[in-house]
Image (cartoon, grey):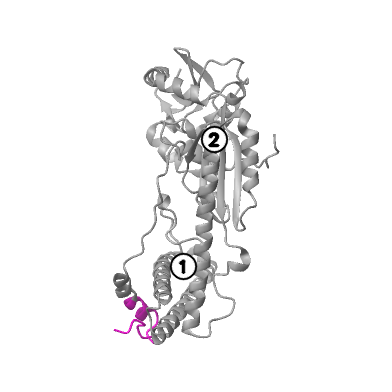
């Protein structure tokens, strides 16, 4: 077979058949490659788009990246219906089937260990945003300062109010993260999101992922819901359930 | 010829505008640093009343000047920022 | 299960997971504000270039 091999995930042999005609990246069908009883979920992709240099160039094209990311997610979603997949990062590409098998051979112990850890678990994403309330958010004072000293005082007051908000936000996020980490089996912190990309308002002060047994999801969601309206100016967003994307990597200390 | 000429009259020159945007971003960074610095010294009672008045007045005038310059080039406050990638934005987004 | 508001999955959330999933961020990266004297020296020059009528507020 020509082309390179794009690997979406690794998993145990499927108990039920995978969704028929499952299409992944580059419009290519998703196939199963069995090596020593572990499955790599794979697509054949064109070298012109997925060889190293071409891939790097494409990754800087937001449209291409979006299409590819969504297609990748589509395959992972289909897998979660029949198994607990170990999702690999976007752009995990090998030369051919042999290349995939060599990788599976090298990482077999790791994969089995991680698959055990992730079995029956899902990931929930929690983000916290801090936003100065509109009435207080005026960057320019409503009343023009009468003197130089007045101006200094006004600016100082505004700066203090903003600092207070950020401090409250940090404390809230810290407490929330502690609470959720205690309930979850594991946690990961992601970098704060770029508002230009997310279009979200306010500053992202917490962007975390929590690993929770599927049966514990309802309680976890309730835990998050309870904190939602606690502090004015702070917004909590919950996403999920996700396949355990954030916990597939090498085990590092959580949070 | 006349069409192109008209369009160029109406649109600010992009190269100049980009350069101005960069320069004003740097000026804005310094202005914010100054305000923060002055604010701290104001808080600690470090300054005489006369100094407070002069610094405050300067900062206020600087702020006005910045607004003038921004508006002249059709730039909003949010436009004066640099995205440092993984380091986040240069200036806090408020 | 509690009904969680379902929106189209945000691209940013997906990219967080597909591009850097599993990476732990230790601590913040903050921009340290320059030392007072350094800032003052630079800004004296700046103020006079922005508005020549206003004398330097730092006296000396």
Nearer-the-camera pick, B9 or C35: C35
Quadrant where the C terminus of chain A sits is top left
Question: Does A247 appear above or below A145?
Answer: above
The residue to which callout 2 is attached is: A184
Tell which subunit mark 1 falls on: B
Q: Which mark is residue B13?
A: 1
Asked if residue C37 lies left or right of residue A182, the reply is left
Write down the region rendered in magenta.
Answer: C44-60
Q: Residues within 10 Å of mark 1 (few under 14, many from 20)?
A: few
Q: Position of residue A32 (x, y in %)?
A: 52, 18
Q: Which numbered disc, 1 or 2, marks the residue closer to the eye?
A: 2
Residue sitting at x 41%, y 67%: B29
Q: Position of residue A224 (x, y in %)?
A: 61, 43
Q: Position of residue B84 (x, y in %)?
A: 41, 54
Question: Does A205 appear above or below B48?
Answer: above
Tell which subunit mark 2 falls on: A
Q: Is residue A157 magenta?
A: no
Residue sitting at x 52%, y 44%: A177
Question: Does A255 appear above or below B52?
Answer: above
Q: Which mark is residue C29?
A: none
Residue sitting at x 42%, y 77%: B42
Residue A58: image quadrant is: top left
Q: Is residue A43 visible?
A: no
Residue sitting at x 64%, y 36%: A219
Nearer-the-camera pick, A129 or A182: A182
Q: Secondary structure at mark 1?
A: loop
1 and 2 marks in contact (CB < 8 Å)? no
């Amino acid at each position: 077979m020509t082309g390179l091999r794009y690997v979406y995930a690794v998993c145990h042999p499927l108990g039920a058949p995978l969704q028929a005609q499952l299409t992944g990246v580059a419009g290519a069908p998703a196939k199963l490659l069995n090596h020593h009883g572990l499955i790599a979920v794979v697509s054949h992709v064109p070298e012109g788009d997925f060889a190293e240099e071409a891939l790097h160039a494409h990754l800087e094209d937001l449209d291409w990246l979006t299409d590819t990311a969504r297609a990748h997610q589509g395959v992972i979603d289909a897998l979660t219906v029949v198994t607990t997949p170990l999702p690999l990062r976007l752009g995990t590409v090998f030369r051919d089937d042999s290349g995939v098998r060599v990788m599976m051979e090298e990482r077999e112990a790791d994969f089995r260990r991680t698959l055990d850890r992730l079995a029956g678990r899902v990931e929930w994403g929690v983000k916290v945003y801090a936003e100065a309330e509109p009435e207080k958010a005026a960057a320019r004072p409503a009343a023009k300062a009468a003197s130089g000293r007045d101006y200094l005082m006004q600016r100082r007051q505004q700066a203090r109010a903003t600092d207070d908000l950020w401090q409250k936000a940090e404390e809230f996020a810290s407490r929330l993260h502690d609470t959720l980490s205690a309930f979850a089996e594991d946690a990961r912190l992601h970098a704060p999101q770029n508002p230009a990309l997310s279009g979200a308002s306010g500053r992202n002060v917490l962007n975390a992922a929590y690993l929770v047994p599927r049966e514990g999801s309802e309680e976890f969601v309730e835990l998050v819901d309870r904190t939602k309206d606690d502090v004015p100016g702070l917004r909590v967003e919950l996403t999920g359930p996700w396949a355990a994307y954030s916990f597939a990597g090498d085990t590092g200390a959580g949070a | 010829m006349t069409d192109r000429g008209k369009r160029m009259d109406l649109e600010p020159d992009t190269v100049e505008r980009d350069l101005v945007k960069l320069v004003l971003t740097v000026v804005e960074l310094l202005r914010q640093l100054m305000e923060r610095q002055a604010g701290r010294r104001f808080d600690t009672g470090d300054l005489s009343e006369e100094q407070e008045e002069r610094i405050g007045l300067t900062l206020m005038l600087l702020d006005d000047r910045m607004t003038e310059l921004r508006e002249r080039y059709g730039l909003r406050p949010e436009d004066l920022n640099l995205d440092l990638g993984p380091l986040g934005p240069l200036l806090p987004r408020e | 299960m509690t009904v969680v508001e379902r929106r189209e999955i945000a691209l940013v959330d997906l990219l967080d997971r597909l591009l850097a999933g599993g990476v732990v961020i230790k601590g913040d990266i903050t921009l340290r504000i320059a030392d007072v004297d350094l800032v003052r020296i630079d800004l004296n020059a700046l103020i006079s270039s922005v508005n020549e009528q206003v004398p330097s507020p730092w006296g000396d």
